[in-house]
Image (cartoon, rainbow, N blue to C red):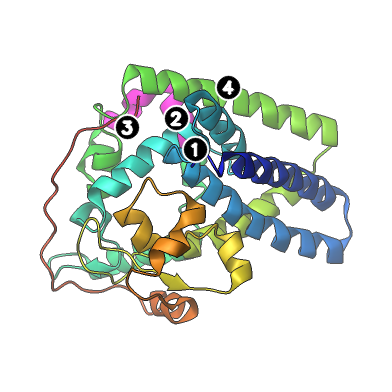
Amino acid sequence: MHNYQNQNLIISGLLFGSQVSLLWIASHADALVFIITVVAFSFLGLTNYAMMHEAMHKNLHSKKSINHTVGMIISWMFPVSFTFMEAAHEVHHKYNRTDHEMFDYYYDTDNFLVKHLQWYSILIGIYPPIIPVGSVLMAIMPRFFLTAPWQKAKSSSIIFNPDLFTPSVIKKIRIDVILGVIFWVSLFHLLKLDPLSVLIVYIATWFNWSTRQYITHAFTPRDIINGAHNLKVSPIMGWVFLNSHWDLVHHQFPDLAWQSLPERGASSKAPIPYWKQYFKLWLGPRRNIEPEPVIKNETYSNE
């Protein structure tokens, strides 16, 4: 990682500056430029999240304080608390392909309509706007997520765990949120951003992000580590994703820097075509025929 951290800092800075600039352009542009800006921002949002992901795994920078600070700043462009996302992502690696994260399959006992509504809400981008709201609520009133609706649902019950969201983690989330609010208020004031234009930009970004977030896990073996795909993409999209399409390699070696994933991928399971996998998603969830994988370690390290 030490060989890559300066590159990560440069990319993070360029991403942050580019996204801020595009928000200003979107707020003051005519129709054609606005459309181009929306599309450009939505793809930079994918790269921004990929770099956030590096920070979640402590791979952005070897120095913990720099890794967290840069992760927090670039997370404002999601926008979300970095600490909140870091905690939720730890859950993902512990519970991947368990019933808690099984959105692509259903049991005969499941409500067929609810499972399909849940699946397509993920694909069309309804889920992402909930994340920023969730991080703000966690900062303001964390006990809200200890109530029955959240603790009874399969997916949210493992995320909103008191052992994960400890007082020290809640404190970090509050710092993220306070600084994030100051950033956005200042940005709107200094750049005279248009709220409607910014909203449209983020709707497009959330849709673009949401349709791709489950693509590397859908219809994979129900295995916590090996339940992921390697996907074949163009060199340009490889840079946009920061090699996150090598997701099986990532789950097998979560501490590996994004720059090293393709090399390790050469000895991994052969990648499948990205678009072939993408279109499968829109056919809807399938009936489950595999047992749930065994969860081996339920301790958390996010402090």
Span shown in magenta: 134-146
How far apart, in angstroms, are the residues tagged by discs 4 and 1?
13 Å
Q: Determine contact: label 2, label 4, CB under 8 Å.
A: no
Mark 3 or mark 2, which is nearer the start of the sequence? 2
Q: Determine contact: label 4, label 1, CB under 8 Å.
A: no
Residue 144 is one of the magenta-drawn residues: yes
Asked which quadrant contains residue 40, the reply is bottom right
Q: Residue at x 40, y 66 (%)?
A: 265
**Which three-letter amino acid code belongs to the residue tagged 3?**
Phe
Q: Is residue 170 visible?
A: yes
Closer-to-camera residue (163/138): 163
Circle 3 residue: 145
Q: Determine contact: label 2, label 1, CB under 8 Å.
A: yes
Mark 3 or mark 1, which is nearer the start of the sequence? 1
- Measured along the vertical axis of the image, is residue 100 above or below residue 59? below
Secondary structure beneath dot 4 equals helix
**Which three-letter amino acid code belongs to the residue tagged 4?**
Ile
Q: Tell me if 284 is positioned left or right of 44 in this view.
A: left
**Which three-letter amino acid code belongs to the residue tagged 2?**
Leu
Q: Give how far across and how far down residue 34 sits, in percent.
A: 81, 60
| Residue 178 disc label | 4
Circle 2 residue: 137
Q: Quadrant of the image for the C terminus?
A: top left
Check disc 3: other Cα within 10 Å, few if <14, some if 14-19, many if 20+.
some
Asked which quadrant contains residue 88, the reply is top left
Q: Tell me if 276 is positioned left or right of 30 in this view.
A: left
Residue 13 is one of the magenta-drawn residues: no
Outermost residue toward the front?
3
Q: Main secondary structure of the magenta part?
A: helix
Mark 1 or mark 4, which is nearer the start of the sequence? 1
Secondary structure beneath dot 1 equals helix
| Residue 133 disc label | 1
